[in-house]
Structure formats: C-alpha cells, structure tokens
Image (cartoon, rainbow, N blue to C red):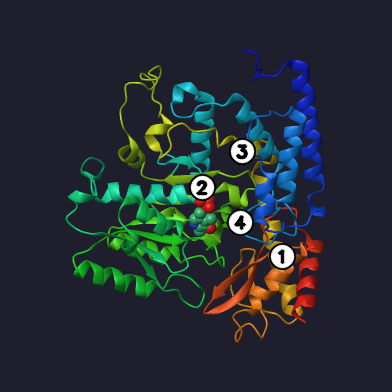
Amino acid sequence: MNINFDSDKDARFETFDYLNKQLEVYYASTSSLPVSPKLNQEEIKKYVHHSFEDPLVYKDAINHVIDGLKKFTVHTPHPNYFGLFNPRANFAGILADTITATFNPQLAAWSHAPFAAEVESNLIVEFGKKFGYNPSAIDGVFTTGGAEANLTAILCALNKAFPDYAKDGLQSLDKKPLIYVSAESHHSLVKAASITGLGLKAVKEIPVNEYLQIDISLLEQQIKDDIKNNLLPIMIVATMGTTGAGAIDAINEIAAIASSYNIWLHADAAYGGALVLSDQYKTLLGNIHLADSITFDAHKSMSVPMNTSMFITKHTHILNKTFRVTTDYMPKEANDLQVTDPFTHSIQWSRRFTGLKIYLSLLIFGWDGYQQVIEQQIKMGNILRDKLLNSGWFIYNKTHLPIVCFGNKNFESDANAALQVSKKIIESGKAWLSVYKINGVNTLRACITNYASNENNIEELVGLLNEIAE
Ligand SMILES: *Cc1c(COP(=O)(O)O)cnc(C)c1O
C-alpha cells in the first residue's frame, strides 16, 4: 500500500501551516467579502469535482475548497449579516472543533470517552442551574440542534403520559395525544410530530395575541374542548423567543395550565434561552424552571460552530426510560460504576464531542464574557430600532431580543415591497436580511446575530435601507 492517510510529520506541519494562513485571511477579513453569493447553480455544479480519478495534492485540494466556500456561501460570519440565528463562530469554538476532529472521541459509551462525557454532563447541570432547576434533579443531553432537542421533548412527553409507550408504541394508545404550540412556534415541532408518527394534525397551533405570544385563554379553551372530545393533551410548548419576531410566551401562565391539566410543559428556548446568561435580562424568561424540559441552542446565541444544542429536563429518569436499549456489543468496562452511557439518553448513537465548543469557550471567556456579549447584542438591537424610527420606519414587533421587524407605509398595501427591498440589499452584497410576515404584513427582519456587528455596521444597514426605499 502506498497511500498515506497520515501524511508525514514535516508535510503535516507545512499543510497545517498553509491551511492556517488561509483560514486566518478569511477570519480577519470576512467583512471585505460580499455577504452573499450570486446563486448560479450551473456555475457551482461546474466548480464541484465530480470524478475522483486524479487525486490532488493537499495544497490544491485546500485551495479548491476554500475558494469554493468563499465564492459560493452566504458569509454568516460577516458583521453585516443581519439574518437568521447563524453567528460568527468564536475562536475558542473553532479550536474546539479542531481538537474534537483530531481526538475523535466516541461519546456513545461513557467508558470510551470519560473526560468528554463528564464535561458534557457537567455542562448540562450548569445550564440547568442557570435556568433555575434544582441542582439535584437535572438531566439532559447534547443534540445536533433545536430540532433534535424538540423531538426528544415530544418523545419524553409521550413516555411520561404513557408508561408503556417504549414497549407498546403508538398503536396501543386508547386516546389520541395532542401537542399545543403557538402559531409563531418553530416548525421543527410539527416536523417532530410527523417523525414520531403522531402526525401533523396532532399539533394544535394556538393563535397569538398582539405581542405575538400564545393566547392563553384560547390555549386553555382548546385544551378543555379536546379533553371533552376524549382526546389527550400531552404537551404544551412555550416558545421563549420566537424565530420570526423574538416573542417570549408568558410561561408562568402556561405553567399554571400545564400543571392543572397534568400536561408536560416544554420551553423551546432555542434562541431566547441566551437571556439566562445576562443578570439584567434573565427575568424576561419568567419562571422557565417550571418547564419540564428546555431546548437551548448554543450554536445560535453562544457563537459556537454548528450542531451544538442541549435538551435539559428536571425529570431525571425520563431520558433513560425513553431511549434505553440493552445491547451485547457495547463496552462493559463501566458496568460497575455509577455512570450514564450517553447513547441510552439520546436519539444519536455514535456521537462527537459536541460540548467541547461550549466548554472551551467558557474556560476562556467565562460566564462574564458571555454576559457582556449578549448584552452588547441587545444594545445593538436597541440602536438599530432607534435609528430606524429616526429615519421614519415603523416597527412591527415588540421584544427586548435583538430582532427588529420593520417597514414603511408602502408595506401594508404592497406585499412585494419588503421582498423587493430585501432582494436589492442581498444583491448589493453589502448586507443580508430577511422578510417576515406579521399580522398579514410582509416586514423586513433584521437580527443582530454576530458579536462583531457594531454601530458602524448598523449605520451602514440603515443607510442602505434609506437609499433603497426612496
Ligand atoms: C432555530 C430554532 C429551532 C430549531 O433549531 P435548530 O438548531 O435549527 O435545529 C427550534 N426552535 C426555535 C424557537 C428556533 O429558533
């Protein structure tokens, strides 16, 4: 065999060094690139290699990939990306992914990766405490994203409502289970309902009030009606920071309903959960500790690379009940220890060391560093709101989170107005923002999602908007 998967020491050093320089150029000068690419699929298809008959040397392969990414990617690390919750990855998070790729620890069994497993279970407890859970009753698992965490929540609610669910499955249920979400909730929940076999129709979307929060009295009325019709409410989802407009559901009142009808309360804090990191703003999350479980996406507001999310619950036996299976082939070295094999708590089996991205970031920046960054982003949101109002724009959403949905007088009569402005901005390559419909009006949506977005970037965005809307 003359193939060398390892390369050799000098060549490795040189290649690492070369890659480093390319990445450094990107990291240091992201803001000089156009924020988004031209979407020409033909051109991209032509650029991608389709046959692998003639191997490249490392340098050429690296150049091919880096140039491809530079040219054909929306640069979410750009400070003028005011888009969805896709942050610029902080440097510690990038290092963490590099370390993880090299050690490649296997987090299915505790005994194969005890350091990684203990780091993750400690992080779950620390975040559970931040959310106000009792330190002695916290369990959870790292997931690939909020979608997997929400799916995990539904499975836990099913296993709580039906003690024999894991064994007998959906077919054995004598009543149809229902899940309640706000009309502004994330669509990963309906997707999860379809994956579990409950079906899309098992999700009841409750209308929202003028603040885009779930309407509490309609929620309770719907639950009463469904019980009367012999259906079984098993879960209510409170969205803590909606994806579209940053609305935070009134969790204290929802918790009262959940408790009086004995329904699992899930807090989808994928985005807004970051508020727990700020002493000043954490009260906006109300009594989130009343929730039976919480979804929190670190890859949104903690600026770590993708696929870093958590499912946290105060029911310490439920994950085990939901996911435990016994096998003959998994390692047995830890059988006599009081430890948890992550695969018995998780949808995933083989799993990477996801938590290291948060662990290394916290080791270096501390909770205090995150508090500063979250509060800075909220401040930038406030500045954006003020500048827009000063230029005569209307604001359509009310939230402390740094998401601003806005428009001008043309937007209410012309559904295309917002789309046209956003199209022009995106095509200019100078910024990125999206369109979101609020009460039937297409509005422009700008979100501060990057710790590096400063007042100048906001000035630039508002300048562009004023120029284009004229
Ligand atoms: C983003 C988001 C999700 C889905 O999370 P992913 O990490 O994209 O899987 C779920 N809920 C809310 C409220 C979100 O904003």
Amino acid identity at mark 1: Ile
Tell me: is circle 2 under 8 Å from ligand 1. yes
Quarter of the rendering occupied by the N terminus: top right
Query: Where is mark 4, residue-wise?
Result: 85
- As measured in the structure, the alpha-carbon distance from the residue carrying label 1 to the one carrying label 3 is 31 Å
- As measured in the structure, the alpha-carbon distance from the residue carrying label 2 to the one carrying label 3 is 14 Å
Who comes first in sequence, dot 4 or dot 2? Answer: 4
Query: Where is mark 3, residue-wise?
Result: 357
Q: Are marks 1 and 3 in contact (CB under 8 Å)?
A: no
Who comes first in sequence, dot 1 or dot 2? Answer: 2
Tell me where residue 453 appears, x and y as whole percent: 75, 57
Query: Where is mark 2, residue-wise?
Result: 145
Who comes first in sequence, dot 4 or dot 3? Answer: 4
- Please state which of the two labelled residues, at mark 2 or mark 3, is closer to the viewer: 2
Q: Residue at x 55, y 66 (%)?
A: 244
Nearer the observer, 388 or 368: 388
Query: Where is mark 1, residue-wise?
Result: 426
Is residue 269 at least partly visible in the picture? no
- As measured in the structure, the alpha-carbon distance from the residue carrying label 4 to the one carrying label 2 is 12 Å
